[in-house]
Image (cartoon, rainbow, N blue to C red):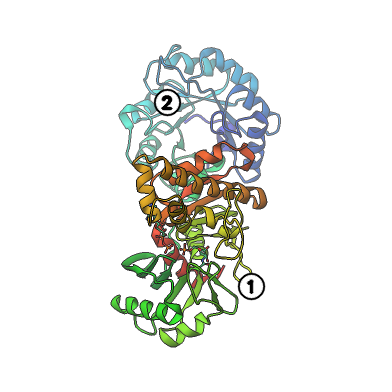
Amino acid sequence: MQTSPLLSQLRGGLIASCQPIDDGPMDRPEIVAAMASAAISGGAVGLRIEGIENLRAVRSVVDVPIIGIVKTASAATPVRIAASIADVQSLIDAGADVIAYDGTDRPRPDGRDGILNAIIKGGALAMADCATLADGVHAVSNGAAIIGTTLSGYTAETQRVDDAPDFSLIESFAELGAFVMAEGRFNTPDLAAKALAAGADAVTVGSALTRLELMTQSFAHAVTHATPKSGMSGFAVDLGGTKTAVARIVEGHVTQYEERATVGAAGPEGQYRQIAEMLRTLGYQRDDRLAVAVTGRVDAAGEWHAVNQTTLQDIASVPLASDLARHIGNATIINDAAAATLAEHRLGAGRGHANFAYITVSTGVGGGLILDGSLHNSPNGIAGHLGFSTSQAGAVLCGSGRFGTVESVASGRAIARMAQDAGHGDLDARAVFGAASNGDEWAIDLRATSVRAIAELCANLVTILGITKIAIGGSVGLASGYVDQVRSELETLPELFRSEVVAAELRRDGPLLGSLLAMADPG
Ligand code: ADP
Ligand code: BMX
């Protein structure tokens, strides 16, 4: 084995390869130099640095051994770690103590041995980045001081399906008696330590230390795919203006579902009777966990009030929590759109957005706001009732008592009312959208009126609250093409007033799942 003070400095230690993603935001010499200093503070005994400019910047702030490389991309050869003979002297002048070159037998303009000889002649140590045992043997017998496993997995011959480092190449290299550098996919401290146990003299780690994009990506993937659903089991009710749904939910999945029409005039007792019947068919028993989402506002005292009194009649100051406890069982209660907001934020389209809004375009237009990561509430339960803000197209008094609301322009009931007023008879919103799909101009116009009011609401949310993402749900909002049209409408506005707008991911399950989430976390 070659001995030199420099190899002794590296032996048994960690070499930090400070290589930002090409052309990424960290690909600047001063940042590479800062990474290098930080890596040394953390205990690295040497550095691997790519590019002459980066090398100069690093050399001026550190005094540990540096392995220098030059990477090129050329259609003529697959060889990338391909300092030309001309580059070798520049690397040495810029402060490299060791120069790494591609130790495979793949052809390149100056030839494998041409480069190796230039490095040795220039007075630097040569490190061969190898893919196979034969590469290592060739390098050692031609004077390379270090053989690395760097290219194992990255040549046609050694391609692999897994992401594991090549420990067996380390073991074979160790028998050659050369200084062995473990390099390539040593992404955890544990793998790096095992490399030394397998016979390596030192280990080089790159991506896991300095490619912030890749490390963030792996954390982001793990977090967004984690299922915060454990414990999300029980029965859930979604009482909307048109339909009432009940579901059995097991670990965040709807396993049984039943839906019936809501009778708006049934009064509280009528609603309880229907809910109780539907729950019974799913096997609910009194002490089971129960969460109920309702259209209408729910105040801090647990009382239920229809805001739009044409949707539900006789629902004013109804003691919902205590009534349910008496008639059915103890239940968490929450507004339907607020529940869907919680669910979309935690499990669906709003994940990762601290300022997020959900809008349901359904019988009415409901909504919910996540501000700084939490559901925004008010003691009287009106906060987040986005449909009772006003629209430029407002022309009638809303059932809430407020003139010109978004709900009175954009909701399913509004669409049906406008169709009736225009002389098209007793059609619901689904039938109007059907006519629009068939090309009926009057129906296309009604749909566009609804879309414009929702786009206006989205822009207002951006302007007032800095909302960055909006999910749209409800059967009108989820109708084919609706969200796309809202997006196109927003495109007509200056960029400042736009946000990302998507369809609700959880669709009809949002209010159901969210009511159970509210049980654990009322916001
Ligand atoms: P709820 O308001 O009870 O929560 P929905 O979200 O299903 O229930 O909304 C009901 C409204 O959606 C009704 O006005 C109905 O006409 C309308 N609707 C249902 N299906 C469609 C559809 N495919 N296209 C347009 N509107 C629809
Ligand atoms: C209305 C209002 C909201 C509700 C929203 C969506 C009532 C009865 N409801 O704006 O509380 O969240 O509709 O509910 O005032 P849905 O009936 O359309 O599902």
* Front of the two marks 1 and 2: 1
- SS class, disc 2: helix
Q: Position of residue 399 (x, y in %)?
A: 54, 65
Quarter of the image with the C terminus is: bottom right
Looking at the rendered structure, the secondary structure element under dot 1 is loop
Query: Picture quarter containing residue 286?
Result: bottom left
For label 2, the crowd category at 10 Å Cα-Cα, with few meaning under 14, some 14 to 19 and many 20 or more, is many
**10 shown above or below 223:** above
Q: In this figure, which residue is indicated by the disc labeled 2?
A: 140
**Residue 492, located in which quarter of the rendered image?**
top right
- Above or below, comparing residue 365 to residue 184 in the picture: below
Can you name the residue that lies furthest to the right here? 60
Q: Is residue 355 left or right of residue 425?
A: right
Q: In the depicted view, which residue is nearer to us: 439 or 210?
A: 439
Residue at the front extreme, as displayed: 423
- Residue at 40 percent across and 80 percent down: it is 270
Q: Amino acid at mark 2?
A: Val
Q: Percent from the top left, x then y, of residue 14? A: 54, 42
Using residue 39 as the reference point, say whether residue 243 is left or right of it.
left
- In space, the residues marked 1 and 2 are separated at their CA atoms by 77 Å
Determine crowd level at label 1: few under 14, some 14-19, many 20+ residues with C-alpha closer than 10 A.
Answer: few
Q: Is mark 1 within 8 Å of ligand 2?
A: no
Front residue of 415/319: it is: 415
Horizontal side of 317 relative to 328 (left or right) equals right
Q: Please tell me the numbered disc located at residue 379.
A: 1
